[in-house]
Image (cartoon, rainbow, N blue to C red):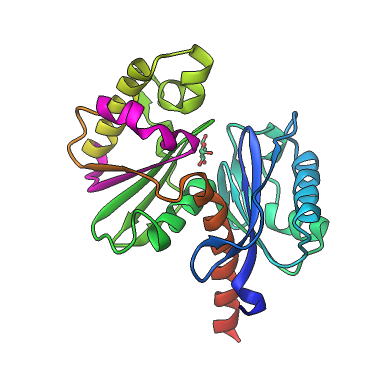
Amino acid sequence: MSANDRIMGVDVGGTGVKAAIVDVRNGTLASEWAKLDTPQPSTPDAVTGVIQQLMKQLKWNGPIGVGFPGLVKGGSVRRAPNLDPSWIGVDLVNTFQKELGVPLVAAGNDADAAGMAEIRFGAGKGIKGNVMMVTLGTGIGTAVFLNGQLVPDTELGHIELRGKDAERSAANSAKERKGWSWKKWGKNVNRYLSTLEFLMGVDLFIIGGGVSKKADKFFPHLKDVTCKVVPATMGNQAGVVGAALFALDALDGAKKKR
Ligand code: BGC
């Protein structure tokens, strides 16, 4: 294994920050799995501190890829609905690089990260057509792939369903907040996914987030979805593995420019 085969992936979420060192050749973990609660308030300084702790735990000071729960454009945060509002406008990549003191930081949307991992190593490997990864967590993240190619930065977790942001009824956090049964929540997910299928012409949905482990509880309620729906095969690890791929792609891009 060469030095560049190992990259630390960090998945920043609304409730937890997860990390591991990833063997980017095959998408497996090359270290223990580390997780800390997302600090409250989840300000840039506090989240940076948590990543520092995770680096210490994993004894890491090499390149880092970060999956972020919001829209990141040109390295800067445009929106982050489930984190402290002080993130807006922060140059995430330069801030992390300076504060963490590592050779490279690459960052992107958390659902794009999870989707990339599933497309390269998991449920979406080799699948042609329009594949959509949907992560049902604190928020709803989406990643669209056309013949394996990512169409980045989609924010389809915020389409309107019955006059409200879809996240309010179909995210896993909505189920927990309202104490809904699998059936009641499953019907909301059904409405959400069938609307996306209709609007986007989806061929395959890959469902991620921690709740994807319980697919048998809510997939039976997805009655109006006519395309195939599968749980993420990499489960909750997809976000961390995909985050590492952001850094791998940045390193590869830099090599090509040389
Ligand atoms: C954000 C997305 C993110 C998703 C999952 C949504 O609220 O707008 O960018 O991917 O939550 O974290």
Residue at the image position 40 percent from the left and 46 percent from the top: 232
- The correct choice, above or below, for 125 with respect to 69 in the image is below
* In magenta segment, residue 200: yes
- The correct choice, above or below, for 171 with respect to 256 in the image is above
Query: Taken as a whole, is the magenta stretch helix, strand or loop?
Result: helix
- The correct choice, above or below, for 179 with respect to 235 in the image is above
Residue at the image position 63 percent from the left and 69 percent from the top: 6
Residue at the image position 69 percent from the left and 52 percent from the top: 92
Horizontal side, residue 64 vs residue 184: left or right:
right
Horizontal side, residue 230 vs residue 212: left or right:
left
Quadrant of the image containing the N terminus: bottom right
Q: In which quarter of the view is residue 164 placed?
A: top left
- Give the image location of residue 35, x and y in percent: 68, 43
Q: Which span is picked out in magenta?
A: 199-221
Q: Nearer the viewer, residue 209 or 68?
A: 209
- Give the image location of residue 146, x and y in percent: 30, 58
Residue at the image position 20 percent from the left and 42 percent from the top: 227
Instruction: Identify the residue at the far bottom of this view.
Output: 258
Q: Nearer the viewer, residue 183 or 249?
A: 183
- Give the image location of residue 34, x and y in percent: 68, 47
Q: In which quarter of the view is residue 158 placed?
A: top left
* In magenta segment, residue 41: no
Q: In which quarter of the view is residue 208 placed?
A: top left
Quadrant of the image containing the C terminus: bottom right
- Give the image location of residue 39, x and y in percent: 75, 33
